């Protein structure tokens, strides 16, 4: 069992590095990517005050991760860490969204659903997946 954890970490690290590369290639100002038990965490520069730019970058993180799930990654939540807060889309909402998407919802409806289910967690609060 002790050998299993380093092997899992070795398998996840290249995947996270590839995702970081994909995000930066897509124009997302990501500084690092790592995985927790049920959450993909992307640390990026930016602020809640950036409005549309932040939404564009958050959408880039979301759709890049969905592509990774289609390629076989486990379903996880997403946490985008900014300087003053973290945007959290929990795994439970990701699973519900995937069921909902199968009903052929359009891109605009999906984006609206994701934004309505994203929580803003201030630095003092703990990021959790309910």
Image (tube, grey):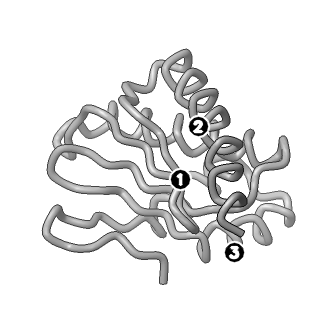
Secondary structure, mark 2, is helix
Q: CA distance from mark 2 to mark 1?
A: 8 Å
Residue, disc 1: 35
**Crowding at mark 2 (Cα within 10 Å: few <14, some 14-19, many 20+):** some
Identify the residue at the far top of this view. 25
* Precedes in sequence: disc 2 or disc 1: 2
- Cα distance in 3D space between marks 3 and 1: 21 Å
Who's the residue at 30% across and 56% down the image?
86
The image quadrant that residue 38 belongs to is bottom right
* Image coords of residue 11 (percent x, y): 71, 43
Mark 3 or mark 1, earlier in chain: 1
53 relative to 77 in the view: left or right = left
How many numbered markers are drawn?
3
Query: Disc 3, disc 1: CB below 8 Å?
Result: no
Q: Position of residue 55 (x, y in %)?
A: 39, 41
Do the residues under discs 2 and 1 have CB atoms within 8 angstroms?
yes
Q: Nearer the viewer, residue 120 or 39?
A: 39
Q: Which residue is mark 2?
A: 16
Q: Residue 78 or 99: which is nearer the viewer?
A: 78
Residue with the mark numbered 3: 96
Which residue is located at x 60 percent, y 38 percent? Answer: 13
Q: Residue furthest bottom?
A: 130
Q: Is residue 116 above or below residue 87?
A: below
Q: Nearer the viewer, mark 3 or mark 1?
A: 1
What SS does tag 1 mark? strand
């Amino acid at each position: 069992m002790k050998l299993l954890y380093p092997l899992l970490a070795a398998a996840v690290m290249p995947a996270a590095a590839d995702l970081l590369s994909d995000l930066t290639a897509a124009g997302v100002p990501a500084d690092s990517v790592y995985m927790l038990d049920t959450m993909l965490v992307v640390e990026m520069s930016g602020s809640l005050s950036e409005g549309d730019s932040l939404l564009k970058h958050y959408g880039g993180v979301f759709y890049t991760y969905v592509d990774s799930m289609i390629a076989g990654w486990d379903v996880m939540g997403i946490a985008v860490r900014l300087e003053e807060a973290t945007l959290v889309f929990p795994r439970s909402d990701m699973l519900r969204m995937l069921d909902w998407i199968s009903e052929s919802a359009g891109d605009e409806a999906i984006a609206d659903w994701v934004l309505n289910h994203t929580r803003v967690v201030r630095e003092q609060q703990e990021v959790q997946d309910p």
